[in-house]
């Protein structure tokens, strides 16, 4: 992997992690285009750690309050939402990992589109019927579990984690701003968990083959791009712009499927 490739992958990871377009799906696509196979999954996890630092800094005040007062509703719901993700990963983890070959990438992007469009349709219908939106005070345990299940499905590359969790929160009737914040806070244990599992595998195999220069550059770029992406998404979600991301992922998914069936340039 060259430094330029690492920087491009870091940029894409940082931007796409918090936009509802699937960072993992874009990484798989670019790695296929660049011809990167060795250490691709490890590099993807390290880029996710770069974006993790962006979340920690962006929500440092909220995180500090959680650390000072850990026995609170917000942390409890983040933990509760993480449980379904862990269960789904433990059961289907090896199958999800095999999908990083890009065999179902086009279909996964289409799934992301459907999720985003459905969420906007439900949110619009709730607004038309003037149903009250929910914040943390009105949120219920089943809401957290439902959002956690959406995150579990997003382990599949091409299905957006942020898109799925924000959509799940909107379909549960949560306020748009709180839905985005809760989704981003959920990314912290998700990224830490995947990094831990990958770190154990790498430690058993040895660190000698890792090219740390490109890895560190990619992480730095992912951090900077992630910081920008978080702030942009927090503003964008208030305007109800998920449907346009759904159009993008639908077009991208269709192109990937077409390539796999007809042109065979990358798939």
Image (cartoon, rainbow, N blue to C red):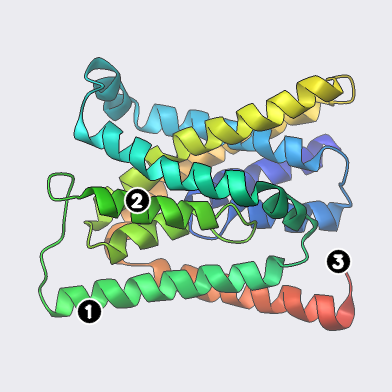
Residue at image point 54% right, 36% down: 191
Residue at image point 76% right, 53% down: 98
Marked residue nearer the N-terminal end (2 or 3):
2
- Tell me the number on the disc at residue 145: 2
Label 1 secondary element: helix
Number of numbered callouts drawn: 3
Label 3 secondary element: loop
Residue at image point 25% right, 36% down: 74
Q: Nearer the viewer, residue 229 or 264?
A: 264
**Which residue is identified by label 3?**
266
Percent coordinates x, y for residue 73 in the rendering: 21, 35
Compared with 59, 229 (above or below) is below
Q: Is residue 199 left or right of 207 when viewed as pictured?
A: left
Q: Nearer the viewer, residue 51 or 186?
A: 186
Marked residue nearer the N-terminal end (1 or 3):
1
Percent coordinates x, y for residue 41 in the rendering: 75, 41
Asked whether the viewer can see residue 80, the reply is yes
Compared with 68, 195 (above or below) is below
* Quarter assignment of residue 63: top left
Q: Nearer the viewer, residue 258 or 10?
A: 258
Q: Nearer the viewer, residue 38 or 145?
A: 145
- Tell me the number on the disc at residue 125: 1
Percent coordinates x, y for residue 71 in the rendering: 22, 24
For the residues labelled 2 and 3, the Cα–Cα distance comes to: 37 Å
Marked residue nearer the N-terminal end (1 or 2):
1
* Quarter assignment of residue 149: bottom left
Residue at image point 85% right, 52% down: 34
Pointer 1 with pointer 2, Cβ within 8 A: no
């Amino acid at each position: 992997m060259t430094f330029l490739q690492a920087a491009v992958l870091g940029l894409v990871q940082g931007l796409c992690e918090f936009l509802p377009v699937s960072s993992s799906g874009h990484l798989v696509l670019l790695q296929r285009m660049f011809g990167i196979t060795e250490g691709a999954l490890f590099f993807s996890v390290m880029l996710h750690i770069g974006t993790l630092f962006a979340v920690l800094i962006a929500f440092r005040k909220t995180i500090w309050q959680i650390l000072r007062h850990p026995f609170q509703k917000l942390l409890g719901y983040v933990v509760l939402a993480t449980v379904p993700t862990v269960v789904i990963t433990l059961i289907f983890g090896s199958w999800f990992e095999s999908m990083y070959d890009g065999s179902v990438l086009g279909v996964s992007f289409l799934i992301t589109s459907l999720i985003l469009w459905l969420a906007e349709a439900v949110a619009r219908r709730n607004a038309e019927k003037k149903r009250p939106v929910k914040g943390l005070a009105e949120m219920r345990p089943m809401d957290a579990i439902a959002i956690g299940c959406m995150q579990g499905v997003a382990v599949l590359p091409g299905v957006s984690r942020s898109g799925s969790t924000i959509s799940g929160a909107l379909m549960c009737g949560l306020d748009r701003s709180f839905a985005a914040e809760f989704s981003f806070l959920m990314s912290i244990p998700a990224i830490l968990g995947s990094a831990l599992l990958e770190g154990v595998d790498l430690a058993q195999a040895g660190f000698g083959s890792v090219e740390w220069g490109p890895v560190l550059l990619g992480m730095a770029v992912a951090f900077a791009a992630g910081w920008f992406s978080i702030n942009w998404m927090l503003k964008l979600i208030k305007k109800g712009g998920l449907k346009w991301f759904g159009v993008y992922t639908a077009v991208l998914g269709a192109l990937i499927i077409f390539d796999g069936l007809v042109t065979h340039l990358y798939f």
